[in-house]
Amino acid sequence: MAGKQAMALHEVRRYLEPGPVVLVSSAWRGERDIMVMGWHTVMEFDPSLIGCVISSANHSFGLIRASGECVINLPTTALTEQVLQIGSTSGSELDKFEEFGLTPEQAERVAAPAIRECHARFECRLHDDSLVDKYNFFIWEVVAARAAAVPRHPETLHYKGDGVFMVSGKIIRRRRPGLK
C-alpha cells in the first residue's frame, strides 16, 4: 500500500459522505425547527426511500419522532452562511426560520414546512422506525417532491468534517449506448 498512510477510523466518513448537505425541517404542535444533515442515503427507488441518522440529542429529533414526518430541503451554496448558522444553534432556543431569514412554505403532503429558498424539497413520512431506538436511524418515504427547473445541476455543499465543505463539481456524462 505504497503512498497511503494509516488514518483514524472515525475519519473514514470524510471520504465516504454520500451526498449534499440538506436542511431538515420539522414541526409538531405549533413548534418548528430546522437542522443540518450531512449524511443520508437513498435506499430504494420505488417507493423512494431515504435513510438517515438523527441524533436523539438534536432538538429536531423529538419533533420528527412525534410527527413521523419531515421535509428534506436541498440548499445551494447561496445558503452557505445560513447552513453554518443553523448547524451551530439549537431550535430549542430560537426559531431558525425567523433568526436566519428563511421562508417557511406550506408543504403539499406533510405538516412540516418546506424552505422556500432551497433548490428542492422532498416531503417525507416515516416508513420504518425499527432502527430508531437502537441507532437513531430513520427510513423515510418521499411522498412529494419539487425542484427548481434551473439550474438543473445546482452547486451544493458536501460536508467533509471539521468545518470543511466541498462544493459539487463539474457534471460529466458517460452513457452506455442504448441507455436512456
Image (cartoon, rainbow, N blue to C red):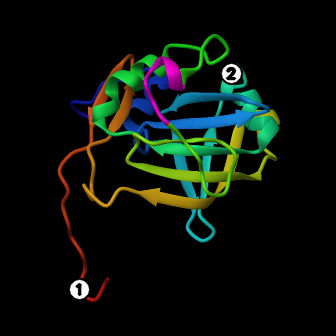
In the rendered image of this protein, does residue 131 appear above or below residue 161?
A: below
Q: In the image, 169: left or right of 30?
A: left
Q: Secondary structure at mark 2?
A: helix
x, y (%) of residue 36? 51, 29
Task: Identify residue for label 1.
Answer: 177
Q: Quadrant of the N terminus?
A: top left
In the rendered image of this protein, does residue 12 appear above or below residue 75?
A: above
Residue 17 visible? The answer is: yes
Q: Name the amino acid, label 2.
A: His
In the rendered image of this protein, does residue 40 appear above or below residue 147?
A: above
x, y (%) of residue 132? 77, 38
Dots 1, 2 in contact, CB < 8 A? no
Task: Identify residue for label 2.
Answer: 59
x, y (%) of residue 8? 44, 20
Which image quadrant for residue 147?
bottom left
The residue under the point 33% across, 36% down is 157
Q: Which residues are magenta?
A: 97-103
Q: How would you rate the neighbour count of disc 2 (Cα within 10 Å): few for under 14, some for 14-19, many for 20 or more?
A: some
Residue 87 visible? The answer is: no
**In front: 61, or 11?**
61
- Decide which of tag 1 and tag 2 comes sooner along the chain: 2
Magenta span includes 99: yes
**In front: 96, or 136?**
96
